Amino acid sequence: MHLPRELQRRFHEAIRQHVDDPEQYSGMIRPTNDPKFGDYQCNAAMPLAKKIGGTNPRDLATQMVDALSVGDLCESPEVAGPGFINLKIRDSWILDRVAQMTQDDRCGVAAADQPRKVIIDFSSPNVAKPMHVGHIRSTVIGDALARVLNFLGHHTITDNHLGDWGTQFGIIIFGYKNFGDPDTVAKNPVPELAKLYRLVNQISEYQKACNQLPVAKQSVDDAQNLIDELTGKIEAAGDDAKAVKSLKKNLSAAKKRLQSARDSVAAMNAKMDAVQTNEDLLKISQQYPDIAQRCLSETAKLHEGDQENLDLWTKFLPYCRDEIDRIYDRLDVQFDHTLGESFYHDRLPGVVDQLSRDGIAAESEGAICVFLDQFDAPMIIRKKDGAFLYATTDLATLQYRREEFAPDEILYVVDTRQSEHFDKLFAVARRMGMEDVRLVHVNFGTVLGADGRPLKTRSGTLIGLESLLDDAVARAQAVVCDPERLQRMDPPMTADEQQSVAETVGIGAIKFADLSHHRTSDYQFNLDKMVALDGNTATYIQYSYARTQSILRRAEMDEEAVVALASKTELVFSQPQERALALRLLQFEEALVSVYDDYAPNQLTDYLFETARAYAVFNDTCPVLKAETDQMRATRLVLVVLCGRLLRKGLELLGIGVADRM
Ligand code: ARG
């Protein structure tokens, strides 16, 4: 049950006598932060008093309380301050719900009465190159949203919109044709293709760096000159505070620019050094002076239907899929569909024709474009040379999804850096009359290293996802299999159990750390913090879960036995910590609904963390096995079981597993 919504409904009834549209004035019902104000607080009297006039909010609040029918749910509501209404949930009501929850495998969460059909486009890596840390966010956030929405009773359709038709394939096709050895590739396709990709990409990046270095150096000089100039002006401005302030602002922007220009120069130098100190690489570069162009023409040939390239693509794609599937297996992520970009290839000319026919797209300098008022640059859907673009494929995809699935909503879980692309895509969709589908760019920020810049390896490449997972598991192993902890385990943990716990904890740590930051913020990747046993981590919550199971083991009861006991016992609260934990457990649905409201899984991680904390407080103050009376013991056992179930379910909805012992 969603308590604030239920209370809200009761408030609507109470104010219907004052206004026709109570939904507009029922205000907000929020949990209070201080128990002395009760459990929830309603602030409706203020806006309502303004609307009807002639009465002060406090008096109105008193009238509302008189008209309010919540006796079954709350103690008598109290009016506080200028007109807040404080609500304290009845203990008897909480205990009833707790008893009901023992019989309910949905942890008290009702299914949506208006289920929506939601397509979730997530993960969507460009295959043919190894998955890197940048892919973790879309994969983990998208998967968590799908799990939560499903559990809430919505109909989700997950689709991995693979980049399986772009330049990366041109790169491996070119690499294979020129440097590949068919036998080695046949024997060991995945690493060999990755090697070819890296080789060609390295040369291409090298050549790009050579071309761009002078410009980058110029930017360093420009930024330095600007800094000198501003410093001079600041001195000259003397005590004109206003001028100094604005100059200093410019100065700090210029310093940032200088830093980033220096970074680019350093990155370019590193790329150049790596090739220039290696004779073989240098030779390749001399032999193919414009390697990027060569790769592009291999891609173009593929798109035009060149048989040789199509055959190579058909041969390589399954290898690339195997590679990413291994990672999805390990992350326990599944998709209903994997319709990559290649799937839409044949539809692209049709999309362009239709938009042109409908007068939405027009030719401009040989290209076909959609001009949009709100944007400086148009959306190009066909280049001058006839090539289609990322945007064209997205339009075709949108059309297909709408026809095939008739969704209410499509979520694109994609990096914030693609915001402009999606803004334009959605604008064009509206022009095409697709108002019936709600389109959302569920954008997210960047994973940063300890230096506050995007996480990279020392040589400047993005960190491979697989090695990151391995590191996390190793780190988790050190924490949970620390010899002192192991010693306390009875019976001892087998090596297999240790390995499996470390895997669950390590992968969980990475996912949770990602999900626990609001998706739009950048966050710093810090493995030690992620696997820590205390703090807002998966490890802490998994550990809390294991504690619930350990109590059951010591009580020599399983969940069923506790449920049976609950049905024969009248439950009681004897300590405020029991009530606090119980009330938290009843707020699961609120947390899940707010995940959907803002497409923000951190609402769930926060809730689980707070619940685990309430459980720790309960554990410290309320002995279970040594409870004074049978009734107290039964109530506490029930809370232990429900809390365990809820933490397990909550983590599962984030795609994170648990271990019964750790
Ligand atoms: N493959 C793209 C990339 O790696 C992401 C695709 C996101 N989905 C979409 N429908 N555009 O940048």
Image (spheres, rainbow, N blue to C red):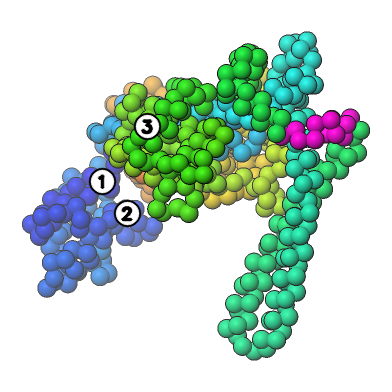
The vertical placement of 660 against 250, above or below, is above
Q: Position of residue 92 (x, y in %)?
A: 25, 42
Can residue 603 be seen from the camera position used here?
Answer: no
Q: CA distance from mark 3 to mark 2?
A: 49 Å
User: Is the shortest distance between ligand 1 and the CB of mark 3 under 8 Å?
Assistant: no
Sequence-earlier tag: 1 or 2: 1
| Residue labelled with disc 3 | 354
Tell me where the magenta segment starts and ends, as one range. Answer: 280-292
Amino acid tagged 1: Arg
The residue under the point 16% across, 54% down is 22
The residue under the point 31% across, 28% down is 406
| Residue labelled with disc 2 | 30
Sequence-earlier tag: 3 or 2: 2
Secondary structure, mark 1, is: helix
Where residue 112 sits, quadrant-wise, is top left
The vertical placement of 61 against 170, above or below, is below
The vertical placement of 241 against 288, above or below, is below
Secondary structure, mark 3, is: helix
Q: Position of residue 170 (x, y in %)?
A: 66, 26
The crowding category of the residue bearing disc 3, from other C-alpha atoms within 10 Å (few below 14, some 14 to 19, many at least 20), is some
Q: Position of residue 333 (x, y in %)?
A: 52, 26
| Residue labelled with disc 1 | 5
Q: Image check: 603 left or right of 89?
A: right
Query: Would you say the residues marked 1 and 3 are in contact, meaning their CB atoms lie under 8 Å apart?
Result: no
The residue under the point 8% across, 57% down is 17
The residue under the point 59% across, 46% down is 446
Q: Name the mark nearer the viewer: 3 or 2.
A: 3
Q: Quadrant of the N terminus?
A: top left
Instruction: Specify the label residue 256 is tagged with.
Output: none
Nearest the viewer among 350 and 33 is: 350
Nearest the viewer among 141 and 605 is: 141
